[in-house]
Image (tube, grey):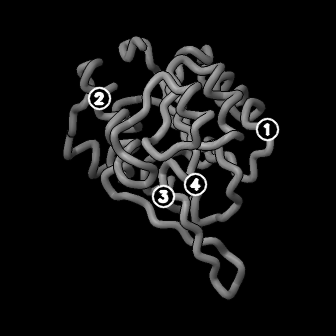
Amino acid sequence: MNLKKIKAFAIDIDGVATDGTLLCSSAGDFLRLYDAKDGFAIRMAAMNGYPVAVITGGSSETIRTRMKASGVKPEDVFLHCRDKMEEFGIFCKRYNLQPEDVMYFGDDIPDLEVMKACGCAVCPADAVAEVQQAADWITDAPGGKGCLREAIEKTLKKQGKWNFDPAVYKQTF
């Protein structure tokens, strides 16, 4: 696993950016809990020039809202995905990336195809067994509890890009 080769990040939502718990509102929207430290890691990646994609089977517009606050461009949030390789290909093409340039975070069966295609497949500690077997890196943290922060921070630090600039942060967020 060569973290210095990573140029972009792509993440699943339920079970990765969240612990997988879904609360259904009376209006039919699914509500999720996100870890603020995971969100900050995504912001740090975006502020330091890394493209970030969300590729999820979830379809709630609240996902877009949360990811926008974390620095993910609206066009890079792919909702209601049933063939994640298709959206992964769109993301790679948009940024002129090879699949091996991307670190992908997944936790369940629909993530396996992308995990096998990407440069570094990461899963949280509580991912299903098949995903853990396919992963290059199993984080110490479970989904929704710091797994994104753990891997993104380590990757950016390895590349000398874990740099917080308050002026850029203020302008961007």
**Local crowd size for mark 3, using a 10 Å CA cut-off: few (<14), some (14–19), many (≥20):** many
Q: Quick one: label 3 or label 1, which is nearer the N terminus?
A: 3
Q: Quick one: label 1 or label 2, which is nearer the N terminus?
A: 1
Q: According to the image, label 3 marks what residue?
A: 19
Q: Which residue is depicted at the point 66% across and 37% down? A: 111
Q: Quick one: label 4 or label 3, which is nearer the N terminus?
A: 4
**Local crowd size for mark 4, using a 10 Å CA cut-off: few (<14), some (14–19), many (≥20):** many
Mark 2 touches mark 4? (CB < 8 Å): no
Cα separation, mark 4 vs mark 1, equals 16 Å
Q: Is residue 89 left or right of residue 12?
A: right
* Numbered circles on residues, count: 4
Residue 79 x, y percent position in the rendering? 70, 51
Against 93, residue 131 (above or below) is below
Q: Amino acid at mark 1?
A: Asp
Cα separation, mark 4 vs mark 3, equals 7 Å
The residue lying toward the viewer, choosing from 61 and 139, is 139
Q: Is residue 133 visible?
A: yes
Q: According to the image, label 1 marks what residue?
A: 83
Residue 60 x, y percent position in the rendering? 66, 64
Q: Which mark is residue 14?
A: 4
Q: According to the image, label 2 marks what residue?
A: 154
Against 7, residue 36 (above or below) is below
Against 122, residue 54 (above or below) is below
Q: Is residue 4 left or right of residue 52?
A: left
Q: Secondary structure at mark 2?
A: helix
Mark 3 touches mark 2? (CB < 8 Å): no
Residue 167 sits in which quadrant?
Answer: top left
Mark 1 touches mark 2? (CB < 8 Å): no
Q: Which mark is residue 101?
A: none
